[in-house]
Every structure is written in structure tokens, then in C-alpha cells.
Image (tube, helix red, strand yellow):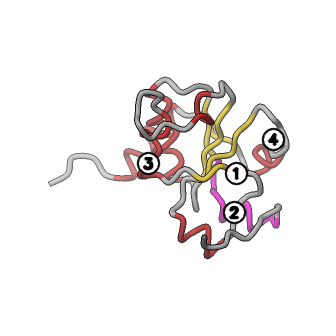
């Protein structure tokens, strides 16, 4: 039997991670000091599209890509920029941002409502094709 559910985990993450509204995130889309990080599964990107310029870092690999000592480390996470995480609806991104914040990555935030909210407002998107 679990002792803590997803509601509690997400509430804990929201309490310690900065949360941007979709409008706040849109205001930083062309900010060179902010990296948009899409943690959705690649199939979600193929199906729904993506925010232009966002780095795709699948949730399952995120901590490995952030850790500079990992054989999977990605240079983008060593840039010293702000990282704004998003997923489809804002739950996975809250958990992801909390995890990397606990690793020491800073500054980080996540977008409330996720990509679904972004698309609903009709902010810029781009198709992602299978490679």
C-alpha cells in the first residue's frame, strides 16, 4: 500500500517550485536566458506538436541528462540559464522541476497547465516529425 499519492507529491512540488502561468512563459519564449524544456514522451510531441525552440528531455532521462557526471549528460543543462519545464498538463513538470531543483539545478520553474494550456491560448507551436 502506498503512503503518499500523486496529489500529495504534486502539492509538495508546487509548494517549493516556482510556477509560471502560460502568459508568463510566453513572455520568455524569446528570452535567451530561459530554456524551455519539454519533458513529454516523444509520441506526445509527434501527436500534439511542440513549443518552438524547446529542448526535448524525456521525463525518464531528465536526471541523467542534468547530472554532469552522468554518461548521458547534456551540455544544455550546464549552461547556467533558467530552465522552464513543461509537460501536457503541468503535473509531471512540477515533479520534474522539483527533482532537478533538489539536484541543485537552478533557477528552475514549471508552467501551470502545460502544453495543453499553451495550445488552448493558440500560442506558437510547431510540428515534430518522426526521425
**Residue at numbered disc 1:** 54
Mark 1 burial class by Cα count in 10 Å: few <14, some 14-19, many 20+? some
Query: Is residue 104 placed above or below 73 in the rendered structure?
Result: above
- From which residue to which does the magenta span run? 111-122
Give percent across and percent down for residue 69. Answer: 42, 27
Query: Is residue 50 placed above or below 75 in the rendered structure?
Result: below
Helix, strand or loop at disc 1?
Answer: loop
**Residue at numbered disc 4:** 28
Mark 4 burial class by Cα count in 10 Å: few <14, some 14-19, many 20+? some
Mark 3 or mark 4, whichever is nearer to me: 3
**Residue at numbered disc 2:** 50
**Residue at numbered disc 3:** 61
Q: Are marks 3 and 2 in contact (CB under 8 Å)?
A: no
Question: What whole-number distance in Å separates the C-alpha atoms at marks 1 and 3?
Answer: 16 Å
Give percent across and percent down for residue 15. Answer: 50, 34
Helix, strand or loop at disc 3?
Answer: helix
Asked if residue 3 is among those painted magenta in the image, a careful observer would answer no
Question: What whole-number distance in Å separates the C-alpha atoms at marks 2 and 1?
Answer: 7 Å
Helix, strand or loop at disc 4?
Answer: loop
Residue 119: image quadrant is bottom right
Question: What whole-number distance in Å separates the C-alpha atoms at marks 4 and 1?
Answer: 12 Å
Helix, strand or loop at disc 2?
Answer: loop
| Name of the residue lying farthest toward the bottom | 47
Mark 4 or mark 2, whichever is nearer to me: 2
Q: Nearer the viewer, residue 20 or 78?
A: 78
Amino acid at each position: 500500500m502506498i503512503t503518499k499519492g500523486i496529489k500529495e507529491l504534486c502539492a509538495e512540488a508546487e509548494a517549493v517550485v516556482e510556477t509560471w502561468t502560460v502568459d508568463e512563459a510566453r513572455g520568455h519564449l524569446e528570452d535567451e536566458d530561459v530554456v524551455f524544456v519539454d519533458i513529454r514522451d516523444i509520441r506526445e510531441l509527434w501527436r500534439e506538436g511542440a513549443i518552438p525552440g524547446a529542448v526535448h528531455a524525456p521525463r525518464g532521462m531528465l536526471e541523467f541528462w542534468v547530472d554532469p557526471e552522468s554518461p548521458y549528460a547534456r551540455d544544455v543543462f550546464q549552461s547556467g540559464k533558467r530552465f522552464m519545464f513543461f509537460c501536457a498538463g503541468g503535473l509531471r513538470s512540477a515533479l520534474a522541476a522539483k527533482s532537478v531543483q533538489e539536484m541543485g539545478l537552478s533557477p528552475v520553474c514549471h508552467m501551470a497547465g502545460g502544453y495543453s494550456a499553451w495550445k488552448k491560448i493558440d500560442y506558437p507551436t510547431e510540428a515534430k516529425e518522426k526521425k
